[in-house]
């Protein structure tokens, strides 16, 4: 069984993947924690965050929080599959070893932690997942390149073209879409839940949202899960909603 949850931000929200939180989410969805084979984090996983040695087996952090977090995650009885968000160190991601998994390439952090590469289509437990990712941090709030903002958080034109080509080869039908920020229609579910509305074209300032909108108009799928907005729409709406924003809650598939 797969468990999908929102941003963990290195140690800040690691309890998204604590046994206690996951068991509670499992209980409410009438599933057993022991059946979880992989937990998917919808971006802003944030490990590795600091520079460290990277070998063929993944990262070897010397910085304290990265080191302890890695040890904590490596004891989990399931794989951890992270999407690329905006609070992810893209300089380090670019150095991670590539391995084959789920019919595609993934980036290896450790023996049980991997980044799913945005733009790829993965077959996981018999279901097809279109994996997107990225979000714009905004220069005003995150002014320091390579410290709290990475230009690669926004897709390049080449990445977008490669993703569209893969969709063309696969066919436009998927079981699920995973992304960091959402498409506009998904983000609007959060605004509607809060009884507020974004300003005119507010959502279109992020090129990642614009690309997600393009994908949303191109394909069919059952559900679109996304993080970034730090709000739980969650499993209570799973059966009725098409777009599922997640933060601390986990949804079981
Ligand atoms: Fe985040």
Image: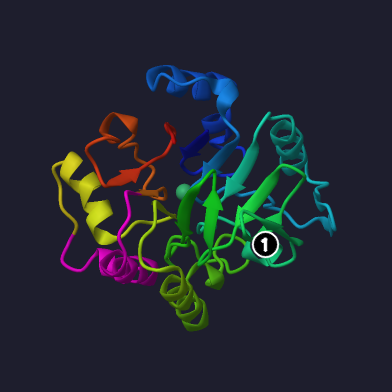
Foreground pick, 145 / 226: 226
The quadrant where residue 164 appears: bottom left
Q: Is mark 1 within 8 Å of ligand 1?
A: no
Q: Residue at x 67, y 62 (%)?
A: 93
Foreground pick, 239 / 225: 239
Disc 1 element: helix
Q: Does residue 46 lie above or below 64 as drawn?
A: below
Foreground pick, 44 / 177: 177
Q: Position of residue 253 (x, y in %)?
A: 44, 36
Q: Position of residue 4 (x, y in %)?
A: 47, 39
Q: Residue at x 47, y 54 (%)?
A: 129
Neighbour tally class for label 1: few under 14, some 14-19, many 20 plus, Cα within 10 Å: some
Magenta run includes residue 206: yes
Foreground pick, 40 / 204: 40
The quadrant where residue 101 appears: bottom right
Q: What color scheme is it?
A: rainbow
Q: Residue at x 36, y 67 (%)?
A: 172
Q: Residue at x 46, y 42 (%)?
A: 6
Relative side of 67 to 102, left or right: right
Magenta run includes residue 125: no
- The range drawn in magenta is 199-223
Relative side of 60 to 163, left or right: right
Q: Position of residue 122 (x, y in %)?
A: 54, 57
Q: Is residue 232 visible?
A: yes
Secondary structure, magenta segment, majority class:
helix
Q: Position of residue 235 (x, y in %)?
A: 34, 31
Query: Which residue is label 1 attached to?
Result: 93
Q: Does residue 26 lie above or below 227 as drawn?
A: above
């Amino acid at each position: 069984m797969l468990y999908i949850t929102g941003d963990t931000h290195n140690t800040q929200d690691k309890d998204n993947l604590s046994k206690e939180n996951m068991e509670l989410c499992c209980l409410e969805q009438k599933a057993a924690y022991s059946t979880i084979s992989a937990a998917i984090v919808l971006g802003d996983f944030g490990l590795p965050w600091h520079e460290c040695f990277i070998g063929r087996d993944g990262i070897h952090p010397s910085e304290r929080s990265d080191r302890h977090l890695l040890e904590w995650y490596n004891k989990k009885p399931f794989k951890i599959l992270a999407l690329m968000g905006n609070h992810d160190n893209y300089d380090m991601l670019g150095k991670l070893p590539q391995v084959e998994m789920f019919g595609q390439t993934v980036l290896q952090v450790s023996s049980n932690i991997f980044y799913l590469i945005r733009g790829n289509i993965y077959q996981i437990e018999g279901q097809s997942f279109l994996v997107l990712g990225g979000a714009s941090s905004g220069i005003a709030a995150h002014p320091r390149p390579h410290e709290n903002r990475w230009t690669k958080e926004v897709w390049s034109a080449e990445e977008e073209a490669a993703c569209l080509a893969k969709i063309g080869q696969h066919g436009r039908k998927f079981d699920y879409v995973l992304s960091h920020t959402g498409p506009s229609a998904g983000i609007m579910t959060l605004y509607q839940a809060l009884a507020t509305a974004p300003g005119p074209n507010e959502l279109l300032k992020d090129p990642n949202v614009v690309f997600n909108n393009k994908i949303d108009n191109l394909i069919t799928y059952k559900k679109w899960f996304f993080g970034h907005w730090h709000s739980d729409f969650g499993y209570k709406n799973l059966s009725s909603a098409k777009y599922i924003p997640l933060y601390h809650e986990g949804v079981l598939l």
